[in-house]
Amino acid sequence: MIDIKKGNIIKKIEMEDATQFIDLAMKAVYERGLNDIDFDKPMFYARCRSILARAANHTIGLFVDDELVGFSIAQITTQPWSTEKICYLNLMHTDTQHRHETYYQLMLDSIYTWAKGLGITRFHTSTVAYLLPEQTRTNMLIKNGYREADIIWEKKID
């Protein structure tokens, strides 16, 4: 299914788009500072291809003139204590030219439509999934009906 809104095309990223997806995903990793000294590029490429191949993932792209300028990775998951399916919005990224709430909203709307078709009504996400200014990101999530349900604490042992 292809949705065309405001001249942009939102569609599922297929294997033939893998090279563009991996290139943009690599930029997402670098922009977030996740490429530490142990970063393994071949493993990263394999994981990106796996993301596209797994049935539990829904990876959509924002294309402008056949160029991938943004993507979102949504994963179907469940909690150990429930069989209710949850859509986890793992990562949403655009190149710097297209980093605007409007483009993120286009991708969110597409994911909501897909999830609704599967009977999924519950969504989880995290603030680090979006490279938007903090207030813009917070306002967008609130406008979309999200509430802060938990705070994740992280510790790294040296």
Image: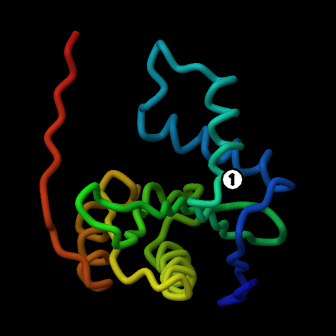
Q: Secondary structure at mark 1?
A: helix
- Residue most extreme to the top: 158
Using the image as rendered, state which of residue 118 and residue 31 is in the foreground: 118
Using the image as rendered, state which of residue 149 and residue 56 is in the foreground: 56
Residue 29 image point, x, y percent? 51, 38
Residue 81 image point, x, y percent? 23, 60
Q: How many marks?
A: 1
Determine whether 46 is above or below 137 in the image: above
Q: Is residue 56 left or right of residue 14?
A: left
The image quadrant of residue 117 is bottom right
Determine whether 118 is above or below 33 in the image: below
Residue 83 image point, x, y percent? 34, 68
Q: Quadrant of the N terminus?
A: bottom right
How is the structure coloured here? Answer: rainbow
Q: Residue at x 37, y 83 (%)?
A: 121
Bin the neighbour count of mark 1 within 10 Å (Cα to Cα): few under 14, some 14-19, many 20 and up: many
The image quadrant of residue 158 is top left
Q: Residue at x 69, y 23 (%)?
A: 42
Determine whether 23 is above or below 102 in the image: above
Residue picked out by circle 1: 52
Q: Residue at x 52, y 57 (%)?
A: 93
Q: Residue at x 72, y 88 (%)?
A: 4
Q: Is residue 33 left or right of residue 57?
A: left
Q: Is residue 121 left or right of residue 91?
A: left
What amino acid is found at the position of numbered circle 1 in the picture?
A: Leu
